[in-house]
Amino acid sequence: MQSIQMAFKSIMGNKMRSFLTMLGIIIGVVAVVVLVSIGQGANQSVSESIQKMGTNLLSVNINMRRNNPINLDRVNEMRRLEGVAQASPVSNSSGTLKAGLNQYEDGSIIATTPGYDVIRNYSLKYGRFITEPDVNNRSFVAVLGQEAAEELFGSLNVVGESFTWKGYPFTVVGVLNEIGTSMIGSGDNLIIIPYTVGERLFQRKGISSVYVSAMSADNVSIAQESLTSYMDRLMVGAYSSTKYNIYNQTTALKTLNTATNTLTLMLGGIAAISLLVGGIGIMNIMLVSVSERTREIGIRKAIGATRRNILSQFLVEALVLSLIGGLIGLGISVLATRLLEPALEMTLNISPSIAALSVGFSLSIGVIFGLYPANKASKLLPVIALRHE
Amino acid sequence: MIKMEGINKCYRLGGENIHALSDVSFNVADGEYVAIIGPSGSGKSTLMNIIGCLDVQDSGSYKLAGTDTSKFSGRQLAKLRNTHIGFIFQGFNLLGRLNALENVELPLIYQGVRRKQRRQRAEEALSIVGLADRMKHRPSQLSGGQQQRVAIARALVANPQIILADEPTGNLDTSTGAEIMDIFEKLNAEGKTIVLITHDTNIAARAQRSLSIVDGRIGFEAQEVM
Ligand SMILES: Nc1ncnc2c1ncn2[C@@H]1O[C@H](COP(=O)(O)OP(=O)(O)OP(=O)(O)O)[C@@H](O)[C@H]1O
Ligand SMILES: [Mg+2]
């Protein structure tokens, strides 16, 4: 009880020293908590975009114009290869879409077949995806991303509405769920149409790009191998392997992921250094006040304080300072992450274990270096402590 | 009450030995009022620190109220200093960050006296030394004489059996000094044992007995005054 009173009197009595001690702790805690949460946030947003793309995604690109052996039947054959779950040809275009007075120019028009939604993990909010009959009958139907639907019709539930592109009328049969912006770009500006319709309107013959999904993330390399041997069989002759490439998205993203892990590690390292610097700050303040405090301890002992009285006073003092500093540090960290979130465009979460770790570390430094001189001085004879300049 | 026999205290300074106290022996009876006089550097403060259990002798025995002080534990010594001895330092030794009242309260805090009672007793002690109007001042805002009186109030507040005063009137004018001496005489009349260090033979003369100390040796037991 007395030691708590004493500690508070002492903290209030020397505001500058108290403030500097807390500052060391605050800086250490804020640095660690904020930097680590940025690292983790970056990591998470990369993982999320991998998830969004589908971790089992591969793409086959064909680099030949003439005698391209790949057609829709071949793509159907690819679906039956070992390790392969789905395969869909893809071709891209862009242009101005019109619906009434509304125009939409930022759309990404994709011509493909059923199954592409599965490959890309797209799900439908309204209506349905492209079907086999759509492809076979060259139906002028389209599935829209949310941005495209909003821009063209001002709402999302637009199944049955129609728009025109290059003068052709399309009927909307489905609207995708929100995809969001990822590191690969916006996913909500899609206009998906049957592959055969695209073939006609894009004035491009032959399939130059096929998206493939493996059975599972573990099957990606098996799928890649079977695709490779399948393609090699089709493209007999010299330089056959230069006529196509197979990209494995997972590999690319893993590289990206490694990069963000390095980033986290680096930020963690910087954070650890700031924590250390903060700790050294606390240490310095505590040690610098040794001489003043040694005299104080001498006086207290001379008028009847026991060693225990002295130590508990200093312990409480160090605990209170470190704890208040730690809490202020956490408060600032929460504020800082909220402010940084929109700027960095990622969700920043403060991990409780990191918060506990950094506060715990500062607390122990505060206590150790607060108690160390007190303990030493409390063992001295009162006269010797009193003589300390 | 105080029984010293063959006390020696030596300081080593760069290979040279300074005998601050050599073979000091004397007794102070319970309820006695003793003055110690001696020139500067003669070892008075050194002796007082040993009497007050703030320092320990190199050799010799010191019995306080019948017990050899070397037998006390740290806890017992703390209790002794807290409740049985009131020590007035030559250099005041007040805590600079506390005001006069808080300084005087300190011994009571370590006794575990409740806040209200503590405050009341500290205020009383300060009024005894004539500082009722300076309670909220910090030591740095007080004159030397006022600081000395705060130190005296702090020594009195716990109502100790023994009062050890190292030049308590050194910074006071004659009339304030005389007031303080009156306080000591009153305390002595109440049965407290008082040991007082002074340069001033007039002040020493007011004690029942005075000891003189020169070069760390007790010179002669001076006259019984009354
Ligand atoms: N810590 C110390 N280290 C070395 N020598 C010391 C120490 N303390 C005291 N002395 C020496 O011991 C001797 C006695 O000192 P002490 O303080 O007891 O004198 P004093 O009689 O109280 O003097 P004054 O009247 O000036 O207060 C002095 O010669 C002093 O130099
Ligand atoms: Mg002295």
Image: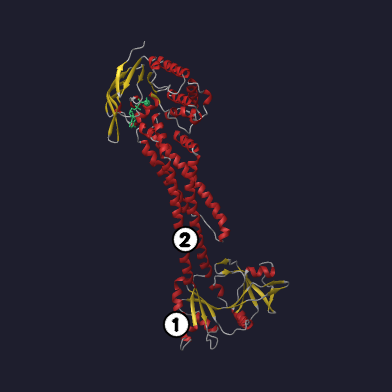
Say whether residue A140 is left or right of residue A119.
right
Q: Crowding at label 1, few (<14), some or many (≥20) Cα neighbours within 10 Å? A: few
Is the residue B165 above or below the residue A41 in the image?
above
Residue at mark 2: chain: A
Q: Residue A113 — which label? A: none
Residue at mark 1: chain: A
Label 1 element class: helix
Q: Residue at x 50, y 40 (%)?
A: A15
Is the residue B217 above or below the residue A377 in the image?
above
- Is the CB of mark 1 within 8 Å of ligand 1? no
Quadrant containing the C terminus of chain B in the rendered view: top left
| x, y percent for residue B22 | 27, 25
Q: Residue at x 51, y 58 (%)?
A: A38
Say whether residue B126 is left or right of residue A378.
right
For this orientation, the residue located farthest to the right is: A101
Ligand 2 in which quarter? top left
| x, y percent for residue A369 | 40, 44
Q: CA distance from mark 1 to mark 2?
A: 39 Å
Label 2 element class: helix
Q: Residue A229 — which label? A: 1
Same subunit: marks 1 and 2: yes
Q: Residue A264 — which label? A: 2
Amino acid bearing label 2: Thr
Amino acid bearing label 1: Ser
Is residue A309 visible in the rendered structure shown here? Answer: no
Along the polypeptide, which appears first: circle 1 or circle 2?
1
| x, y percent for residue A100 | 73, 73
Figure quadrant of residue B43: top left
Say whether residue B63 is left or right of residue B116.
left
Figure quadrant of residue A142: bottom right
Figure quadrant of residue A288: top left
| x, y percent for residue A212 | 51, 76
